[in-house]
Image: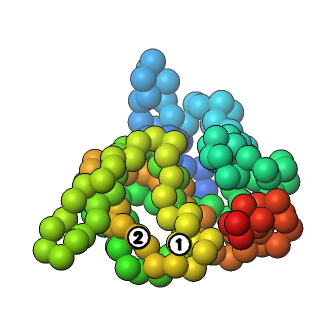
Amino acid sequence: WCTERGRHKLEGEPGCERVRGFRAGEVLPGGIESHEVGALCPDETALRTIELAGIEEQFRGIDFLAVLDAHALHMLAEHAQKRVYLSGELVVREGEQGEEFFVIMEGEADVVIKTGDQTTRVATLKIGQFFGEMSLLTGTPRSATVQAKSQLTVTVIGKNAMSQVLSRTPKLADQFRR
């Protein structure tokens, strides 16, 4: 049940929305009831705009994406997905074909390689670092396994989105032909 201005509604009915993890009618920090903050909360379009701006900013910090103009960065951001992996989950496996490229938003991931029966951690990736780009861009199999060291939130760019940007940005494509 949700409460909207004293009237009970079933969750999912119009006017019974969740507000940043709170149900309508629940008391938020500061003693404000969630149904009272509707005017303060941005709509979905505004939230998406904020999310895209954050993704674009993240992409600007990646060296090989620095050649992209604002339109290309925006296009990549629009096609990006957010994923969450639990501690210990494999994100990519060594030897698999790469169809995606990952940027770490939160958490850490271990990069491990296998030589015979030995598994060796070669790096730990943190917020803002990325992986999977070479396999995605060159078509070679993944050179390492990446495993979430903690809960891991990543932005994912798929092959189709990257192909569209590569076809429109010769400078970026040239970086991978060398």
Among the 4 quarters of the image, the one containing residue 119? bottom left
Q: How crowded is mark 2: few (under 14 residues within 10 Å), some or many (20 or more)?
A: many
Say which residue label 1 marks.
Answer: 135
Q: Which residue is drawn at 51% across and 42% down?
A: 128
Residue 10 x, y percent position in the rendering:
45, 58
Q: Residue at x 41, y 36 (%)?
A: 26
Secondary structure of the residue carrying tag 1 is helix
Say which residue label 2 marks.
Answer: 143
Q: Residue furthest front?
A: 178
Residue 176 x, y percent position in the rendering:
68, 66
Residue 124 x, y percent position in the rendering:
33, 47
Q: Is residue 124 left or right of residue 13?
A: left
Among the 4 quarters of the image, the one containing residue 78? bottom right
Q: Is residue 171 left or right of residue 83?
A: right
Residues marked 2 and 1 touching at CB (< 8 Å): yes
Q: Is residue 80 above or below residue 9?
A: below
Q: Is residue 74 left or right of residue 121?
A: right
Q: Is residue 48 left or right of residue 101?
A: right
Residue 61's disc is: none
Along the viewing direction, whichever of 97 and 52 lies nearer the viewer: 97
Residue 167 x, y percent position in the rendering:
82, 72
Tell me how far mark 2 sits from mark 1, CA to CA. Answer: 8 Å
Q: Which residue is drawn at 67% across and 52% down?
A: 64
Q: Residues within 10 Å of mark 1 (few under 14, many from 20)?
A: some
- Specify whether residue 134 is in view: yes
